[in-house]
Image (tube, rainbow, N blue to C red):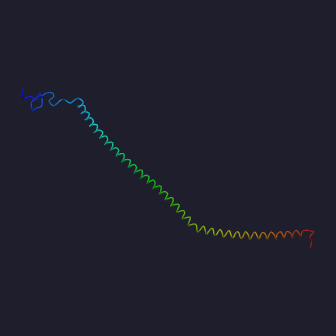
Amino acid sequence: MEGRDNGGGRSGYPPDGPYARGPPPPPYQHELGGAKEEIHRLNMVIGDIRAEKDAHSREFIEKRLKLEAEAMRLRNEDLRMELAGQVENLTQELGMARADNQQIPMMRHEIDGMHQDLMLARSAFMYEKKANVELMEQRQAMEKNLVSMHDPDNRF
């Protein structure tokens, strides 16, 4: 039995038999390897899911930003239209005010004319009132004279 070493194998060569490459791994190491492969596969799936989620998030963010920009544009457009309407109304009001202001000198002239007419009417009224008082006094005096002329007791 020369040429055999204490391990039962030939010197310089690995031993023959079922344990030629070493003892088989215990069963949990085999399961551990499968679990590691499963974990690796799941990590890749998780990575893919995260990448997809990030892509969706970016897409939603881009859509939100576009919608916000559109909303801002619409608000600005609405505001612009509202302001344009206000400017148009104010321009019309300004035009009417200018037209009214152009009428002021003519209206002042008319008012001055009416004031003069009023003063003349007042003077005429006062003149006629005074004349009526004088006429009333003359009438009363004449009635007195008539009454005294017809009075039989009052003879001249």
Q: Nearer the viewer, residue 149 or 29?
A: 29
Q: Is residue 5 above or below residue 117?
A: above
In which image quadrant can residue 56 be found?
A: top left
Whole-percent x and y of residue 151? Answer: 91, 68
Q: Residue furthest top?
A: 1
Whole-percent x and y of residue 111? Answer: 63, 68
Q: Residue furthest bottom?
A: 156
Q: Residue furthest left?
A: 2
Could you tell me how many numbered marks the image carries?
0
Q: Is residue 14 above or below residue 91?
A: above
Q: Is residue 24 above or below residue 117?
A: above
Q: Nearer the viewer, residue 80 or 156?
A: 80
In which image quadrant can residue 11 be found?
A: top left
Q: Quadrant of the N terminus?
A: top left
Whole-percent x and y of residue 45? Answer: 29, 38
Instruction: Tell whether 40 sits left or right of 88.
Output: left
Q: Nearer the viewer, residue 19 or 119?
A: 19
In which image quadrant can residue 49 be found?
A: top left
Whole-percent x and y of residue 92? Answer: 51, 60
Instruction: Tell whether 40 sits left or right of 13.
Output: right
Q: Quadrant of the C terminus?
A: bottom right
